[in-house]
Amino acid sequence: MKQKLVPPFTKQTALAKVKAAENAWNTRDPEVVALAYSEDSDWRNRDEFFQGRDAIKEFLTRKWQKELHYKLSKELWAFTGNHISVRFEYEWQHAESGQWYRTHGNEHWEFDPDGLMRRRDSSANDIKIAPDQLRLARPDNGASQ
């Protein structure tokens, strides 16, 4: 039987929640990703603030039109009750310039009783990298959009 990933989190359920988020984001499908968030989920992504699944889908659609060959890795940083914090890194190629980037950041998540994320607060920094520095993304492994 599949374990339900709802708060209060244990180490096992927090790790599983982080892995599920990583897997969903790596689909690069805004419809799939948005299902993990409450209907009125509040987001801060860098300097953008928005609310709700429709806004999440619009943001992700725009994001993945710009960020090609996107590949993400998430790591559990801390958890308690209905909160999880992660560090992440992902690699991507800019759609217009062709420049590769590795993005490093942190996210803080808050969940409702059903295990849907009702708040996501994300900070990130982009670092230019050369193609021979890729650790995650591979443009020739079927990861292209």
Image (cartoon, rainbow, N blue to C red):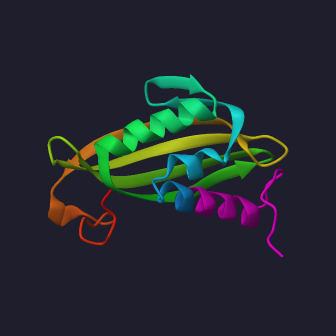
Q: Residue at 68% of width from left, 64% of height from top? A: 16
The C terminus sits in image quarter: bottom left
Q: Is residue 96 left or right of residue 16?
A: left
**Place of residue 52 in the rendered image (x, y in percent of width and height, measured from the top left):** 64, 30
Left or right: where 63 falls relative to 8: left
Does residue 7 belong to the magenta stretch?
yes
Which residue, as the protein is rendered here, is positioned at the far bottom? 1
Looking at the image, which residue is at 61% across and 40% down? 108
Residue depicted at x 43% and y 40%: 61
The total number of labels drawn is 0
Judge whether residue 27 is colored magenta. Answer: no
| Residue drawn where x is 29% and y is 51% of the image | 68
In this rendering, the answer to whether 4 lies above or below 43 is: below
Residue 87 versus residue 39: which sits nearer the camera? 39
Picture coordinates of residue 70, whole percent (x, y): 36, 55
Relative to 11, residue 141 above or below: below
- Is 98 on the left-hand or right-hand side of 140? left
Q: Position of residue 60 (x, y in %)?
A: 46, 40
In the rendered image, which quarter contains the N terminus? bottom right
Up the image or down, 128 lies above or below 133; here it is: above
Residue range in magenta is: 1-21
